[in-house]
Image: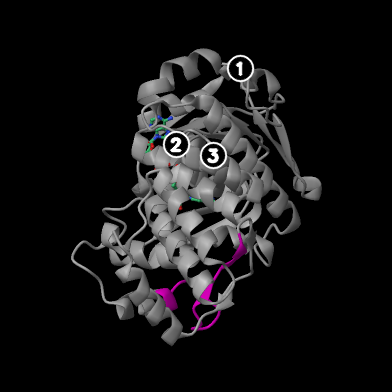
Amino acid sequence: MCLSEGFPIKKIIPVKLGQRSYKIEYVESLEGIRDKVSPIKGKEFALIDSRLDAFHGKKLRKVFTNFEFLIVPSGERSKSFSVLEKIANTLVKKGATRHSRLYAIGGGVVGDLTGFLSGVFMRGIPFIQIPTTLLAMVDSSVGGKTAVNIATGKNLVGIFHQPQAVFIFPQFLETLPLRELLCGLSESLKTALIADKKLVSYLENFSYTQKERNLEFFTYLSAKCVEIKAAIVSKDEKEENIRAYLNFGHTLAHAIETKLEYKKLLHGEAVSIGQRFAALLSRRLGYLSNTDEIRIENLLAKYHLPRRLKNAFPKGIDPKTLVSLMRADKKNVQADIRFVLLQKLGKASLPQKVEEQELLASLKEFQTLAP
Ligand SMILES: NC(=O)c1ccc[n+]([C@@H]2O[C@H](COP(=O)([O-])OP(=O)(O)OC[C@H]3O[C@@H](n4cnc5c(N)ncnc54)[C@H](O)[C@@H]3O)[C@@H](O)[C@H]2O)c1
């Protein structure tokens, strides 16, 4: 596949963080990755998602002959201390040292787990991200947020640990289930909405069909989103400021996910509903025009993303329940409920406090939108 035909992209995108700088690089073959990584003294280990392994494991082993492959069971449950400890023990038994390097080959689950492990194994060894889901390509592989989940919540124990490099091989997307692809689309639309009006218009005009998996389109979209995220992270690595824009749609999404106990909806689906709500709230608070709110509605609809609370709670949900869950979110300052809002298409504002009365009224209005 030629990455650039009709969809020109920057094939190398820098994240500028002084000594921790690195590049996100698009490659057209697995050999392209092998030939680009600098050799190291120690042994190299690839943590690979089990489902991905079933599809691509053979090819990967043929190309990366010097890697020891460790299979990580597919699914969010692998982002746990027990899996982390098991892998750390295996690494030691197989000869990993301070001079070793890890590769994360999978989606956000393997990426977050491998990143965290490499940050703490022998007090820190390098790792390289090879994302294989659209969500990981546009979001989780860039920026160095790593974490595992604990009983009291998702991503509650983690560190910032930047990868040494990120390699994106879009052909992995050929085997990605459609629902997972949509989750990546949801995070991509988010990135466009917070930072790039031109990309919003492009997405509105692109003739998208769900049947055909247009890899050139997904390559282009991911490269645009990576450019945006890399620029944001380069300015605000630790989310003290503008990195928070990337949480657009996430305040309600987290409440939905907690209420559903992380079942039924995937993260990107909850984020899509959250974005629709944040658009409504942005209009109600006087930032976004009616027309722009409708454009967001239509954009999410065009990419077949869920946009109503009914998609999460077919039997209905009391707005008060959602408000109390939002109050408990870890991103809040004290008990304030804070939202990233849109000032206009392509421009977000830093999280701001929204009063409970306004939220309840907005959620009520949200529930009255036509299906
Ligand atoms: N670190 C960050 O900045 C950040 C940002 C967003 C999300 N996350 C985290 O990312 C995780 C979600 O990531 P995700 O959506 O990639 O989920 P995931 O890693 O669970 O992958 C989704 C599914 O796709 C399968 N899969 C992966 N690649 C495949 C391929 N090419 N072909 C076929 N199947 C494939 C996996 O086995 C899994 O079943 C969450 O844990 C979330 O907290 C982290």
Q: Nearer the viewer, residue 225 or 95?
A: 225
- Give the class, few, some or many, for how many residues have Cα within 10 Å of label 2's Cα (few <14, many ≥20): few
Q: Quadrant of the C terminus?
A: bottom left
**Residue furthest toward the right?**
18
Picture disc at residue 205:
3
Q: Nearer the viewer, residue 335 or 67?
A: 335
Split into quadrants, the picture shows ligand 1 in the one at top left
Q: Nearer the viewer, residue 108 or 84?
A: 108
Q: Give coordinates of residue 117: x percent, y percent.
A: 53, 46
Q: CA distance from mark 1 to mark 3?
A: 23 Å
When the figure is inspected, residue 355 is found, relative to residue 34, above or below; the finding is below
What span is colored magenta in the figure? 326-344
Q: Quadrant of residue 54?
A: top left
Picture disc at residue 330:
none
In this rendering, would 45 be left or right of 252?
A: right
Q: Identify the residue at image location x=50%, y=75%.
A: 284
Q: Give coordinates of residue 225: x percent, y percent.
A: 61, 43
Magenta span dominant secondary structure: loop
In this rendering, would 37 be left or right of 118?
A: right
Determine which residue is flagged by label 2.
90
Whether residue 17 is in magenta: the answer is no
In this rendering, would 207 be left or right of 51?
A: right
Determine which residue is flagged by label 1.
2
Q: Give coordinates of residue 329: x percent, y percent.
A: 45, 72
First in sequence: mark 3 vs mark 2: 2
- Amino acid type shown at disc 2: Thr
Q: Identify the residue at image location x=43%, y=25%.
A: 174
**Residue furthest toward the left?**
315
SS type, badge 1: loop
